[in-house]
Amino acid sequence: MAALTAERDTQRRAGNGASYAMAAIKIWAGSLVCISTATGYATKGAAATTLVAVGAAKETVDNSAGAAGDLRISVDREGWFRFGNSASGDLIALDDIGKDCYVVDDQTVALTDATGTRSKAGKIRDVDAQGVWIEFV
């Protein structure tokens, strides 16, 4: 496609979220949702290098009895979202604010990519006793 030479009517999806075709799995409301670069389908967060974090699930959707793409998952992505903090070696602290964090599972983030075995979750925005506030970027 060539560069623009006139105005373009760029379509936009309204709201602060999106919906994605899902893999044949169940994704719980509030979970960290990713897109698999291997399949293109939404999946729950996990320790893998083929995931792109896209937001937090707005609802529980069970596509485990269906085929990939049969159902869609809606996610929120604007704002900060609190997920669980990883264990001692990968624990995120206040002095890590502004750094990247990485997906451990569908509810936990860590400070490191575990020697290249985890995908980026987002930016660390705050840390408190209940977990880590992240922003999807």
Image: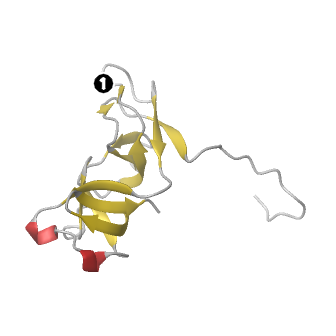
Q: Identify which residue, 65 or 85, lies in the foreground.
A: 85
**Residue ID at (22%, 70%):** 92
Q: Which residue lies furthest to the left in this view?
A: 88
Q: Is residue 136 left or right of residue 12?
A: left
The quadrant of the picture occupied by the N terminus is bottom right
**Residue ID at (40%, 29%):** 68
Q: Identify which residue, 67 or 78, lies in the foreground.
A: 78
For label 1, count other residues whose C-alpha is less than 10 Å away and answer few (under 14), some (14-19) or many (20+). Answer: some
Residue 99 coordinates in the image, percent (x, y): 34, 75
- In the image, is residue 15 above or below residue 120? above
Residue 2 coordinates in the image, percent (x, y): 79, 62
- Quarter residue 124 falls in: bottom left
Residue 28 coordinates in the image, percent (x, y): 31, 34
Q: Residue furthest right?
A: 6
Q: Which residue lies furthest to the front in this view?
A: 129
Can you see residue 115? yes
Can you see residue 119? no
Q: The residue tagged with tag 1: helix, strand or loop?
A: loop
What colour-coding does the image apply? secondary structure
Q: Is residue 48 left or right of residue 7?
A: left
**Residue ID at (65%, 43%):** 14
Type of amino acid at the residue the image marks with label 1: Ser
Q: Which residue has dot 1 on it?
A: 64
- Quarter residue 70 falls in: top left
- In the image, is residue 107 above or below residue 72? below
